[in-house]
Amino acid sequence: MNLMQQVGERALQLGVPLNVHLDLTYRCNEQCVHCYLDHHDHGEMTTAEIKHLLKEMADAGVFILTLSGGEIFLRKDLFEILERARELTFCIRLKTNAVLIRQAQAARLRDLGVESVQVSIYSHRPEVHDAITKIPGSFRRSIDAIRLLKSHGVRVQIANVLMTENQDDYRGTHALAEELGAKFTLDPIVAPMMDGDRGVMDLNVSESALHDTFRDESLIEDVAEFCAPPRAADESLLDSLPCSAGHTSCYISPYGEFYPCVQFPLSCGNVRERSFIDIWRHSEQLREVRSIRLRDLSSCSQCAHGGSCTRCPGLAFLEGNMRGPSTQDCEKSFARTGIPSVNLLSKKQQKKDQASPPRLVQIQLVPAVTGRRLAEMGNAAAAMAS
Amino acid sequence: MSRKVYIARSPRIAARKLGEETLVMAAQGSTLFTLNPTATILWQAADGVTALDDIVERHICSEFEVEPEQAMRDAEALAQELAGHGILLISEQPIPAVKNSPVQEQYR
């Protein structure tokens, strides 16, 4: 167990929200094809509200604060917020497309001691990246900003999302990240929109493309281990927590809505109406999320992947049941190991059943069925059932 | 010991108390440290204007059964170690607060 994991365990014991993801805005200057957000402004928190929230979060013990959006640099008060957050000694991580970062902004981020900046880059080819963001020239501006940040000594991570539009480009993007001195992460799935719309999921790559990606040694350090046969959950794992969402981490929207995670849009309260710590400690919804153990997941607890799956409870929630499986994670597990999950097998069976529907039963009208006879038939049915 | 030593928390760190311990992340290198309860006492008292021997006397010797000389040696060693990681500043002069220093608010 590394130090960060030990700290996470300690925070869990103490009930401390160690990590918070705060979206400052959903507005964006890009229009990415796979984005899960509604970019209209429905009443963002004001500067004063956010500063008040920062103080509440610091008092509650929040250490790592991820500020994201939308595009955070569209907020005119971004640096005022960052200054206040650094006064409160948060470890700050930013997520941005970096299009609006110039010399002055890069220098300010360095001076403020921002821990890292994650920049979304979808391809090493400008035309592919720009087709995804739908903004011509966005690739060049983002890459120029990364160079500026690096030249100022700011740590940069390039985040790539694998989708049909760029599935052949992740190696090139990885190489570009290395050339720029940036870390590289690849998210292999496109998540549904926060409102539940699953249309964007059509952009997910095929099963075979995912299979190949998971065996790419330039990306996966230890392919044999990563793609090893699954482990079922043993007794101790059955009592483990599904993930940190709602346990040591949470998410707050630009409108003050409090969720267990950005990918888990179960509203637990609003920080405009209740204090952060009150929601964290007393929300009924969080209490329910925290009560869930692997053994409570009817399908997953029985699954061959139970001990090694990366099931996201938020994706399961978006699929309709926070105690159910997340099919996207089942697909990832299948792509890694070649062994279908209980959920995938069940879905396959359902498809089969739908493909060959039961033979229609010929119903004949029975003439002159009286009320008395109907009652007798009902009694007979009841007797059979008992 | 005749010379005075002053210690101050670096303005380029992130820090938060977690129970009796303190998490400290150095901006440079993104390295995470956890300070035990005794180191946390020293850390919290590192205001740049209180001399280290005064900190030891007021906060360490009064709390723990330890010889003052031993406590001072341990405190100096710890301060040097933290300074080596860039999370603590050491000077023979009082260290003025850095304007907009992110560490002023938390321990007020």
Image (tube, coloured by chain):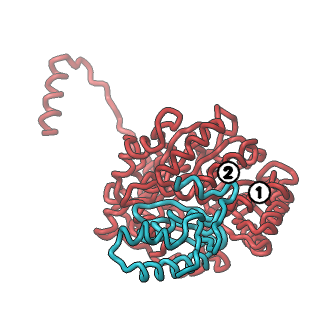
Chain colours: A red, B cyan
Check whether the beta carbons of the residues at disc 1 and disc 2 lie within 8 A of each other.
yes
Q: Amino acid at mark 1?
A: Arg
Q: Position of residue A198 (x, y in %)?
A: 59, 45
Q: For the residue carrying disc 2, how many other residues have a C-alpha within 10 Å: few (<14), some (14-19), or many (20+)?
A: many
In the image shown, does A288 or A108 lie closer to the viewer?
A: A108
Q: Chain of mark 2?
A: A
Image quarter of residue A304: bottom left
Give the structural element (helix, strand or loop) at label 2: helix
Q: Residue at x 65, y 35 (%)?
A: A46
How many marks can you see?
2
Give the structural element (helix, strand or loop) at label 1: helix
Disc sitting over residue A108 in the figure: 1
Look at the image and tell me in which quarter the C terminus of chain A lies: top left
- Left or right of A364: which side holds A64? right
Q: Mark 1 to mark 2: distance in Å?
A: 10 Å
Disc sitting over residue A82 in the figure: 2
Q: Amino acid at mark 2?
A: Leu
In the image shown, does A134 or A203 lie closer to the viewer?
A: A134
Q: Is residue A65 visible to us here?
A: yes
Q: Earlier in the sequence, mark 1 or mark 2?
A: 2
Q: Position of residue A86 (x, y in %)?
A: 63, 55
> With respect to residue A322, does A176 lie above or below?
below
Q: Position of residue A97 (x, y in %)?
A: 75, 54
> With respect to residue B2, does A278 lie above or below?
above
Q: Residue at x 39, y 72 (%)?
A: B61
Q: Position of residue A126 (x, y in %)?
A: 85, 60
Q: Chain of mark 1?
A: A
In the image shown, does B96 or A111 lie closer to the viewer?
A: B96
Q: Residue at x 72, y 68 (%)?
A: A170
Look at the image and tell me in which quarter the N terminus of chain A lies: bottom left
Q: Residue at x 65, y 32 (%)?
A: A42
